[in-house]
Amino acid sequence: MNNTASEHDIAALFEEKVHADLFSYLQTEGAVDSHLPECPDVEELWPVIARAYMPDGAREFQNYPTVSLGWMMFIGMAMAQYWDTDWARYSAMENIYLHIRELRGYDNLDDAVIEDVIGLKDKDAEKLSALAGECASRVYNMLCHEHVEPGTPAAMGCYIAALHQLYLAGMAVQLKTLGYHMVPLN
């Protein structure tokens, strides 16, 4: 097996572990339903958002790893909110990540999403922030225990896999908050 295939396999397996852990945790918190929502419109923008986010996220990871990870969950929440409110407008933006970041700057991206995009205040805002913070901490802990050498392609693959799952988790949490539930039709 060549290194590229091995690195891809490491990232894919890691992404599966992150997915299982995050969604199990979010279910126990009542933040998502047992059947996760699907939103292909939001999911399709992941590669564009990831490319735009990487310079900021990778730069911040060394000193603020949970922020670097957690901000992607907030971006997923914002995308679900935008999908629900005015997808034609937001999906046409050239750089939706830049739009979100520039609301209050990178350092305040969480507050911008919670207050400006979603419209939460006080205890509801604190609760959502704590939920995202716990998810980011869980994922960071998983990254630390993955035993991949920092700065390698395998480490970058695991980081991107983690961001992807946090993005999807943010989307799922916000879709449930908005009242979208995936339930079987009788």
Image (tube, rainbow, N blue to C red):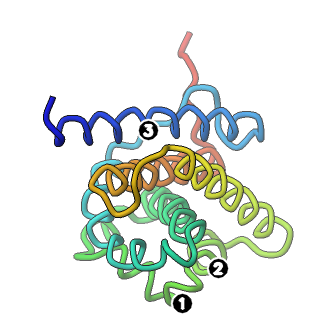
Between the C-alphas of marks 1 and 3, the distance is 32 Å
Q: Position of residue 24 (x, y in %)?
A: 66, 32
Q: Amino acid at mark 3?
A: Phe
The residue under the point 63% across, 26% down is 34
Dots 2, 1 in contact, CB < 8 A: yes
Residue 169: mark in rendering: none
Looking at the rendered structure, the kind of residue marked 2 is Asp
The C terminus appears in which quarter of the rendering?
top right
Q: Residue at x 24, y 69 (%)?
A: 92
In the rendered image, residue 178, in percent from the top left (x then y), is placed at 61, 51
Label 2: which residue? 111
Residue that sits furthest to the right in the current view: 123
Q: Is residue 75 above or below residue 28?
A: below
Using the rendered view, name the quadrant where residue 14 is placed: top left
SS type, badge 1: helix
Foreground of the two, 153 or 123? 153
Residue placed under numbered mark 1 in the picture: 104
Secondary structure beneath dot 2 equals helix
Quadrant location of the N terminus in the rendered image: top left
Lower position in the chain sequence, tag 1 or tag 3 = 3
Q: Residue at x 55, y 68 (%)?
A: 65
Residue ID for mark 3: 14
